[in-house]
Image (cartoon, rainbow, N blue to C red):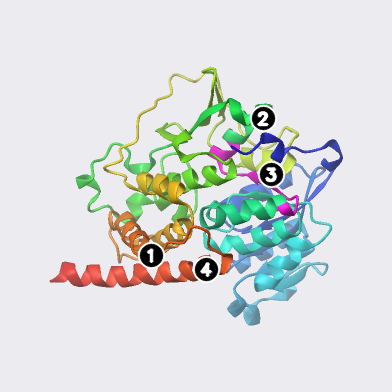
Amino acid sequence: MRSVSAFAVTPASVSSRRRVVVLGSTGSIGTSCLDVIAHLPTRLQALGLSAHASWEALSEQAQRFRPRWITVTDPALMPRLERSTLPASCALLCGDEGIVTMVSDPEVDVVVSAIVGAAGLTGTWAALEAGKTVAFANKETLVMAGPLVMDLAARRQARLLPVDSEHSAIFQALQGSSPREVERVVLTASGGPFRGRTRKELADVSVEQALQHPTWRMGPKITIDSATLMNKALEIIEARWLFDLDPARIEVIIHPESVIHSFVEFTDGSILAQLSPPDMRLPIQYALTYPERLAGPTKRLNWRELSAWHFQQPDHDTFPALQLGFEVARRGGTCGAVLNAANEAAVGRFLVGELSFLDIVTACRAVLEHHHFSAAPSLAELATLDRWARQEVMRWTHLHHSTTRT
């Protein structure tokens, strides 16, 4: 397990006002991040923002936060943008080049990587190359290229701070402890909207039903991942690389209330957990202000209203995504990139009605089992396999439809 000292901060690195670039500022994590920044104006400043296609929302954010730059990552939008809606001091950048310009600037202290999916790897990689602190909600970066990313961070003396509530909880619980004292970590999962259902009952799940998460408000892709438990599978892989854990020391437990965000069990039998209401602004703020804790916008637990918390073992037969997560964490190599790309493509097909809910994980396993495995791939190889896996899901979808029709 990676030494906790790898995440340490010296007093000199704590500045009075940290300058932040938010990649994916119009998504659920990005807007929560800007809410934290708005509540801590003497400690945090939004220096750069990016979005892919949500120009109106990005323009409104630029008017409110007055960043130095904004970046639109979809080049096709550029000719149609109304630059007059931007503050005069705000530069409009485009594509990956704009992302790299923002995250590499010497005045930037923290980069928030909140772009969903494989697209988030570019900005995270560039920020780590520049030696920045990266507060990352984009778990796909470590799922796809965990060893390469952690090696880059070490070489550039950059810092990765988790924003996912589960990994933030583990990170907080590990503070002050030696890696050799850790017995295991336990990731909690809400169970999503279909907790307690049988596999037969999920055969005809609609998109609308799958998007009704009981405790969290997230974007559609992550919400579907939560419903299949693929989100937890990806978090298993993320924890394996971020904390340098043997996958055998990672477990998952269902906790419907989403108040306990994860556990760390130590060799003496002690267990530390991090608790808070299900509000992403808390782990975001902790990453932005680490190692300090400040009063912020998040709501508090009302201890007088608490009655009981519940736990149960996950149903691996109904939700086979979890086993995929453990398998990929054990194998490493190219498996993470293939699983992530296949899942993104399969979720996309489900959202437009071309795959059933249960087909999502089935398609992922089929693609994973038929790829050419490499134990130590390069970044270029991972990018090639990412494209291949997406194409394979399309091919699998077509063949599956042809088979079911006949």
Which of the labelled discs sits on residue 371, or is there none? 1
Q: How far, Cα to Cα, is label 3 from label 2?
A: 23 Å
Q: How far, Cα to Cα, is label 3 from label 4?
A: 38 Å
Residue 338 is one of the magenta-drawn residues: no
Residue drawn at the location 82% of the way across and 40% of the way down = 14
Instruction: Please tell me whether mark 3 sits on a helix, a strand or a loop.
Output: helix
Within 10 angstroms of label 3, few (less than 14), some, or many (20 or more) residues? many
Instruction: Please tell me whether mark 2 sits on a helix, a strand or a loop.
Output: loop
Residue 163 is one of the magenta-drawn residues: yes
Q: Name the residue type under label 1.
A: His
Which is nearer the N-term, disc 3 or disc 4? 3
- Mark 2 highlights which residue? 175
Query: What residue range appears in magenta?
Result: 155-169
Residue drawn at the location 59% of the way across and 60% of the way down = 120
Q: How far, Cα to Cα, is label 2 from label 4?
A: 36 Å
- Mark 4 highlights which residue? 381
Q: Are marks 3 and 2 in contact (CB under 8 Å)?
A: no
Instruction: Please tell me whether mark 4 sits on a helix, a strand or a loop.
Output: helix
Q: Which of the pair 39/358 is nearer the observer?
A: 358
Residue drawn at the location 59% of the way across and 25% of the way down = 181
Q: Residue furthest front?
A: 375
Residue drawn at the location 41% of the way across and 67% of the way down = 389
Q: Are marks 3 and 1 in contact (CB under 8 Å)?
A: no
- Mark 3 highlights which residue? 36
Within 10 angstroms of label 2, few (less than 14), some, or many (20 or more) residues? few
Q: How far, Cα to Cα, is label 4 from label 1?
A: 12 Å
Residue 171 in picture, x, y percent from top left: 62, 35
Q: Quadrant of residue 113?
A: bottom right
Which is nearer the N-term, disc 3 or disc 1? 3
